Image (cartoon, helix red, strand yellow):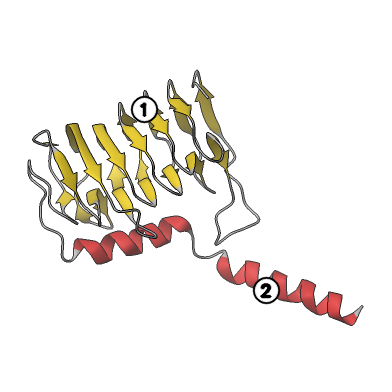
Amino acid sequence: GLLLIVFIITISINVNTQSSYSSLDKFKDIFSKRFATAVECGSVPTNGCIVTQNTTFVRGVYNLPDGILAGEVSGQGASGIVLDCNSSIIDGTLNLDSVGILIGGIDQTIKNCIISNYYTGVWLGTSNSLFSSNTLLNNSKYGIEIISYNNTISSNFLVKNGAGINIKTASNDNTIIDNFIIGNVLNGIQFIPDEFNLGSFPTSADVLNNTL
């Protein structure tokens, strides 16, 4: 009986301690750290570069183990950008915790990208943004992980990832529409609590007309 009481108290303390930090905070920390050494991608992206202005890539295959940054976090970078990958392949090496594109800020548009062979294809920490007409293929954990709110994820192909789309705590009011999500190892679309706040789940999302 005493052991059970101690166990319950310990769990309660851990949850309360962790709840002040979130996956979005973790995203901001990683984005800011990488921003310090990133150069502008331009039309031919290089490993670990950042997109802070309207950009169209020269169509090609780009091996970028550290992926790219797009947008803005905490005043670093820019919002309101359009990144058109022009059907380019952004390719990783399946390294643990690697991300194809980290997207932050407000009013971003990311389109026509083929993102493959990362741990997570896209880490979406932006809001009021559009992620459309992209292909997420063979990313070992998630095709897309959403950790923010009020985005539209539309007309994407998500095939052979660990899970297709992962939606975390506080990622409310996202619209997931007209996506083709098949052949993923786990769920096509899943809602899970933030690992830093295990007692909380996303409360709202519009999931419409997807092929699962």
Q: In the rendered image of this protein, does residue 174 appear above or below residue 162? A: above
Res 26 quadrant in image: bottom left
Three-letter amino acid code at disc 2? Answer: Ile
Does residue 145 appear left or right of residue 63 in this picture?
A: right
Three-letter amino acid code at disc 1? Answer: Asn
Does residue 4 appear left or right of residue 128 in this picture?
A: right
Residue indicated by mark 1: 156
For disc 1, the neighbor class at 10 Å (few under 14, some 14 to 19, many from 20) is many
Gap between marks 1 and 2, in whole Å?
41 Å
Residue 128 visible in this rendered orientation of the protein: no
Residue indicated by mark 2: 13
Residue found at x 55% / y 62%: 196
Q: Position of residue 63 (x, y in %)?
A: 19, 49
Q: Position of residue 204 (x, y in %)?
A: 56, 35
Residue found at x 59% / y 40%: 203
Of 112 and 160, nearer the camera is 160
For disc 2, the neighbor class at 10 Å (few under 14, some 14 to 19, many from 20) is few
Residue 88 visible in this rendered orientation of the protein: yes
In the picture, the disc for residue 116 is none
Q: In the rendered image of this protein, does residue 170 appear above or below residue 174? A: below
Q: Secondary structure at mark 1?
A: loop
Q: Secondary structure at mark 2?
A: helix
Total numbered labels placed on residues in the image:
2
Circle nearer the viewer, 1 or 2? 1
Quadrant in which the N terminus is drawn: bottom right
Q: Of the residues under marks 1 and 2, which one precedes in the sequence?
A: 2
Res 186 quadrant in image: top right
Q: Residue furthest right?
A: 1
Residue found at x 23% / y 51%: 69
